[in-house]
Structure formats: structure tokens, C-alpha cells
């Protein structure tokens, strides 16, 4: 007779699972995790040890194995900002399924029977995740897919239990083959259309949607970032200025502001001086939560920006910035800003314009209709100071244009039609119109993109989301320096448009924060600390198992003891124990005969009925009224018959 520990899933099933693991590793990049899983799966054929598929142990193993897989994947996997969907979530689910497959191979009970469909489904999900690409460079799929389905089909007859009809495993597989083949063919045939659709969804007026603004703003028909709840910055002690500027632009042509981010020349940033002691209490601390293009966001009037050691900043001096970290610096970043005052320029950010910069900030773009300049003169007629002109332009735009997330740019220049036709539009139009009108009134002005910070988290902390992306203007006023000019109506500012955050989104953000803390700790701690924490985690998982085992032993030894059976029944019990051993299924200590027969019924099928009959009669005499002599003789005959059958079978 066989032993339950020696029963293993068919080798063809293991090969199919390994092929699914290979496809997932090639597409997700989780090579180490899936190599470990592959080794663990193959090791189940080399060792006979198995775990009991019941109680707390199986859940402890699942938490340890699957949790470790997902944790290690998330701390190493990088987000693809150009992808339409974040595949890290799908790959995490597939890794969990792969871990469950390996656990199924290490169960004490044979993998198959009623659980076979689950294992087949998990294997299919892993392979499906590994095939989630339309890239023609992944030619390995054309070889892995046929091999996978070949070995899976070969495994099915052996994989199913004796009580499971073949149609319940073969038919779903054939249906999956047809659906999968048709789906893959459809994706491959129409991949160009699908890629075009994805590009259309990803494209728009903002080249870098993940940070909420573009390296070269283009005036389009809509401002799509108002619905995005993705967090970008966390600011502590922000002060009175909610405008966090990222980039400034001074040239305009063909609906776009320039120069673009990729056209600017960067040099190492020279900090003006350490943050003065007097400014330490008022210093602004910023955690950058999304570093898609490395921009540093700060108020207009800032003494300087300082980062922790190991981080360096770059500055584009010929284009008034921006300030950023190098593209190669992708580590989490916290930087400190020393705030200044608005009565005079202090640092590089709000420095007075040079003569060339002043000339650039007064240029009327050639695309602008001449009637716009005439309109500007009407607005500023009779005004003598630049501050008065700024106020008049803002009042004009508020009085003649209304805010709208969508607009019709028209066929000509969109700024001109916005001003002359009094159109409704979003903040980029109001900022652009303010720049053009003020330049026409001889006020140096530039276009600015950034964030309007308004969402308080309490304790002096302000959260900035993608939906807080905003555009405004900055005008140079002699005697005052650069001033912020926000011509967008109040009902169009991010604080007025922001809706309530759904509770489920808050919960998701807390989970992201926890993962971020863990990820930062993993990347900054040494191996000694990591080993200590991992040991504590394993110990925490083992302690409940050890305690549970101790409790069972204690109960078996002291808390619950049967009275000693009669001498005749005791002798029969010893003979029955030897009979089970002869049948190759000795009963472990702590397990009742009924439990043992139920767990080993497929190995003692030929003797199951008489064995159960003997156990039933023995239990009736053992725990009921004392048996009579004829009843003992009858029970002994039944046992003798079982012993004879077992002896005859082994001869």
C-alpha cells in the first residue's frame, strides 16, 4: 500500500506550471521570486515531507509565502508612467496564484480530486498574466503557449480525482483554449487599432500626465486633470502662499508655450546660502510623492531650496528654471524651502530679470490678433502704475469670460479668440490672456504652471493632488518684484472645483503610505536590521503553531483521558493497531480510528467497510455498557477475519 506523503501531482502538471512561471517572469521581471517558486515546486518531488492542509498552519504558510512574494515585488518593481494600466497590480495577483500553486504541491493530501479545477485555474491565470503584452518583441510566447497547453492537457487525466468526471476538467480547458486563441488572434490582428486607441487615451494637451502638467503647455479644448486624485506633494508649514510654481514660459507660438522642458539647458544648482537660523521655524518641508520628471515646486518668493545628502539639484538659468533633480535620481525626496518676502527679490527663483529677460517678457507673440493689443490699450487707458494695470486686466477677464473645463479653440489663435469673443475656458486660457494683455500694456509678464495647494491634512500639513494643477501669470512690478497674477475666476480655482474624496480612496491612500514607509525602510536599512525583522516575523508566525501543538499534547496527556478499557477490549485494540500497520496505514497518535479511516479511505478501499464495522462495534462496547462474552467473541471473529484478509493480500 502507498503512503499519502508519497502521492505527488503528475510531472506534466509541474512542467505546465513551470512554463507559466517562465512566461510571468519574462513579462513582469520578477525573476528571483519566480525562480525561487520553481525551485520550491521541483523540491516537492525530491522530498516526501508535507504539511497538513488544515487549521492555522496552512494560513500561516499562505501569509508567509504569498506575502513575501508580493512584498518583494512591490519594493523592486518600477511604475511605467507611459502604460495605460498599472500592471503591477495584475502581476501581484499572478504571483499570489503562483505561490498558491507551489503550496498545493506541498500538501499532504494529493493535489487533485475536488481541488484539481482550482489548481488548473490558478495555473491558467499565471500564464495569462505572463502573456499580457502586445509587444512583437516577445516572441517567446509563440513557443511557450503551445508547450504550456500540451503539458496541461497531458496532466488532466492524471490530475483529476477518481470521483471527478473527465468532462469537468477537459471541457473547461478546451473552452479556455478556444477563447484564449480567439482573443489572442483578435488582439494581434487589431493591435494597431488598439495601440492607437491607447495612445489617444494617454495623449492630450499634457505630455506628462503623472505630474499634472506638461513640459510644453498646449492650449487645447479641455483641462483633463481636474478629476485625478493622485497625490503629488505633501507640504508642511506652507505659509500664506498657496501657489507652488514648477515651470515658467516666456515664448508663445502655434498654441504652445515654450521653451519646452527638453529644450532647456541645465547646470548644477547653486544654493544662495544655508537656511538662516531665523527661518528654520518657518521653513517649508516638501515630500515629493511623484517624481515623473523630477520638478521641484516652491513658492515664488523663496530664499533657497535644500535637499538631503545624496540628492543634487539642477537649474536652467537662461529660462528662469525650472529647478529639478537629475533624471537618474528616482529615490524618494524631501526638500526644504526657506520662504522669503514679496517686497524684493531674494534668490534665483524670484531674481530680477536681466535686460534680455525683460525684453522677452514684453514680446507680443506674432500669432496674436492686432485687435487684442487695441483691447489692452482700452483696458489700461488712463492708468499710470503697473499694479493698476494688473488689477484692470484681471477685472476685465473676470467680467467678460467665465470658467469652463472645456472650450472650442477655434481655427485661429485660441488666445485671441478667447479675449475677443469672450469665450468660456479653463485656467490655461486665463493665464495666457493675462500674459498677452499685460505685455501689451508694457508690463513684463510670464506664464507659470504649477499647483494650487489647499487641501489640509491637519497638523500644518497640506496635500497636493494632480487635480490641483493650475496655470497663472507672474508680472514684474518695479519696486515690488515679481507678483503672482491669477486671472482665473474664483470658481475655477482648484480649491473651488475640488470635490469630496471618497472614503474607499482614503483607505487606499493609507495602504499606499504604509507600503511607502516599508519600501523606504527596506531601501535604507542594512542587512542586519532586515534579518532581525524577518526573524521576528517568522517567529511571530511560528509561536501560534508551537502553542497550538503544545495545547494538543497537553490535552492528550492530562486534560482528556479515557478510562482504561477492559482487558479483552484492550487486547483487541492492540491487534487492530497492528492490523492497520500491516495494511501500510498506521494510525498516528492523537487521531481517532474513525478520523484515520476517513483520511486514508482511498488506500484501504478493499477493507474500508469491514474496518468501519469493526470500529463501530468496538466503540459501542468501549464507551457503552460492558459487552457480554458472546459479544466479545463476535467482535474477535470480525477482527480475525480482517487479519486473515490482510495476511492473504500480503502473501
Image (tube, grey):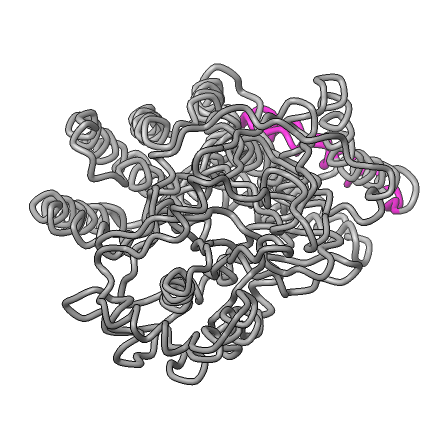
In this rendering, the answer to whether 624 lies above or below 609 is below
Q: In this view, does 200 lie to the left or right of 395?
A: left
Q: Residue at x 47, y 60 (%)?
A: 473
In this rendering, the answer to whether 495 lies above or below 564 is below
Taking the magenta stretch, the answer to whether it contains residue 96 is no
Residue 374, image x, y percentages: 29, 73
Between residue 388 and residue 216, name the one nearer to us. Answer: 388
Q: Which residue is drawn at 56% across and 60% down?
A: 484
Q: Which residue is drawn at 71% across and 55% down?
A: 238
Residue 451, image x, y percentages: 53, 57
Query: Which residue appears farthest toward the right when viewing the image?
Result: 558
In this rendering, the answer to whether 8 lies above or below 361 is above
Residue 6, image x, y percentages: 48, 23
Q: Quadrant of residue 528?
A: top right
Query: Which residue appears farthest toward the top when viewing the image?
Result: 46
In this rendering, the answer to whether 414 lies above or below 154 is below
Q: Which residue is drawn at 61% across and 27% down?
A: 270
Query: Which residue appears farthest toward the bottom when viewing the image?
Result: 399
Q: What residue range appears in magenta?
A: 560-589
Taking the magenta stretch, the answer to whether it contains residue 566 is yes
Tag count: 0
- The image quadrant where one finds the C terminus is top left
Residue 463, image x, y percentages: 64, 57
**Do we see residue 292 in this rendering?**
no
**Do we see residue 588 in this rendering?**
yes
Q: Is residue 75 left or right of residue 237?
A: left
Q: In which quarter of the image is residue 430?
A: bottom left
Q: Is residue 36 left or right of residue 173?
A: right
Between residue 138 and residue 610, name the one nearer to us. Answer: 138
Between residue 330 and residue 326, name the one nearer to us. Answer: 326
Amino acid at each position: 500500500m502507498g503512503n499519502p506523503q508519497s502521492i505527488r501531482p503528475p510531472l506534466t502538471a509541474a512542467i505546465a506550471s513551470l512554463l507559466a512561471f517562465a512566461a510571468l517572469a519574462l513579462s513582469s521581471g520578477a525573476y528571483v521570486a519566480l525562480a525561487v517558486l520553481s525551485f520550491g515546486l521541483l523540491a516537492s518531488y525530491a522530498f516526501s515531507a508535507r504539511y497538513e492542509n488544515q487549521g492555522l498552519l496552512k494560513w500561516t504558510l499562505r501569509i508567509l509565502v504569498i506575502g513575501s512574494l508580493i512584498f518583494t515585488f512591490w519594493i523592486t518593481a518600477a511604475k511605467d508612467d507611459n502604460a495605460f494600466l498599472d500592471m503591477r497590480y495584475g502581476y501581484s495577483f499572478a504571483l499570489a496564484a503562483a505561490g498558491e500553486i507551489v503550496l498545493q504541491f506541498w500538501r499532504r493530501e494529493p493535489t487533485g480530486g475536488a481541488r484539481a479545477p482550482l489548481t488548473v485555474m490558478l495555473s491558467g491565470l499565471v500564464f495569462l498574466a505572463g502573456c499580457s503584452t502586445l509587444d512583437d518583441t516577445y516572441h517567446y510566447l509563440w513557443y511557450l503557449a503551445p508547450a504550456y497547453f500540451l503539458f496541461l492537457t497531458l496532466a488532466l487525466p492524471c490530475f483529476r480525482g477518481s470521483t471527478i468526471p473527465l468532462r469537468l476538467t477537459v471541457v473547461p480547458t478546451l473552452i479556455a483554449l478556444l477563447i484564449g486563441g480567439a482573443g489572442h488572434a483578435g488582439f494581434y490582428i487589431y493591435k494597431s487599432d488598439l495601440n492607437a486607441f491607447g495612445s489617444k487615451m494617454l495623449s492630450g494637451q499634457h505630455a506628462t500626465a503623472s505630474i499634472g502638467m506638461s513640459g510644453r503647455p498646449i492650449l487645447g479644448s479641455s483641462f483633463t486633470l481636474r478629476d485625478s486624485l493622485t497625490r503629488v506633494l505633501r507640504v508642511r508649514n506652507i505659509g500664506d502662499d498657496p501657489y507652488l510654481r514648477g515651470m515658467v514660459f516666456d515664448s508663445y507660438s502655434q498654441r504652445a508655450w515654450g521653451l519646452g522642458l527638453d529644450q532647456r539647458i541645465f547646470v548644477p544648482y547653486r544654493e544662495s546660502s544655508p537656511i538662516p537660523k531665523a527661518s528654520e521655524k518657518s521653513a517649508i518641508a516638501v515630500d515629493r510623492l511623484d517624481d515623473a520628471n523630477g520638478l521641484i515646486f516652491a513658492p515664488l518668493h523663496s530664499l533657497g531650496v535644500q535637499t538631503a545628502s545624496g540628492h543634487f539639484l539642477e537649474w536652467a538659468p537662461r529660462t528662469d528654471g525650472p529647478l529639478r533633480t537629475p533624471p537618474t535620481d528616482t529615490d524618494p525626496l524631501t526638500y526644504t524651502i526657506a520662504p522669503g518676502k514679496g517686497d524684493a527679490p531674494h534668490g534665483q527663483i524670484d531674481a530680477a530679470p536681466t535686460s534680455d529677460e525683460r525684453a522677452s517678457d514684453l514680446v507680443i507673440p506674432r500669432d496674436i490678433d492686432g485687435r487684442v493689443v487695441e483691447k489692452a490699450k482700452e483696458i489700461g487707458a488712463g492708468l499710470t502704475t503697473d499694479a493698476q494695470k494688473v488689477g484692470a486686466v484681471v477685472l476685465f477677464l473676470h467680467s467678460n469670460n467665465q470658467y469652463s473645463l472645456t472650450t472650442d479653440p477655434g481655427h485661429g489663435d485660441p488666445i485671441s479668440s478667447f479675449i475677443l469673443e469672450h469665450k468660456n475656458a479653463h485656467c490655461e486660457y486665463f493665464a495666457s490672456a493675462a500674459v498677452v494683455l499685460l505685455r501689451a500694456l508694457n508690463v513684463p509678464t510670464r506664464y507659470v504652471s504649477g499647483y494650487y495647494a489647499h487641501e489640509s491634512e491637519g497638523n500644518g500639513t497640506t496635500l497636493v493632488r494632480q487635480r490641483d494643477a493650475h496655470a497663472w501669470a507672474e508680472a514684474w512690478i518695479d519696486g515690488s518684484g515679481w507678483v503672482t497674477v491669477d486671472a482665473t475666476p474664483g470658481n475655477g480655482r482648484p480649491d473651488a472645483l475640488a470635490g469630496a474624496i471618497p472614503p474607499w480612496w482614503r483607505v487606499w491612500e493609507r495602504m499606499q503610505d504604509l507600503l511607502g514607509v516599508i519600501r523606504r525602510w527596506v531601501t535604507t536599512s542594512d542587512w542586519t536590521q532586515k534579518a532581525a525583522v524577518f526573524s521576528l516575523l517568522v517567529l511571530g508566525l511560528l509561536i501560534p503553531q508551537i502553542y497550538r501543538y503544545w495545547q494538543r499534547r497537553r490535552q492528550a496527556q492530562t486534560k482528556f483521558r479515557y478510562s482504561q478499557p477492559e482487558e479483552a477490549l484492550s487486547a483487541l485494540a492492540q491487534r487492530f493497531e497492528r492490523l492497520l500497520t500491516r495494511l501500510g496505514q498506521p494510525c498516528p497518535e492523537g487521531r481517532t480510528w474513525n478520523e484515520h479511516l476517513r483520511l486514508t479511505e482511498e488506500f484501504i478501499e478493499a477493507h474500508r467497510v469491514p474496518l468501519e464495522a469493526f470500529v463501530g462495534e468496538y466503540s459501542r462496547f468501549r464507551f457503552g455498557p460492558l459487552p457480554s462474552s458472546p459479544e466479545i467473541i463476535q467482535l474477535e471473529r470480525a477482527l480475525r477475519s480482517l487479519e486473515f484478509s490482510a495476511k492473504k493480500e500480503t502473501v
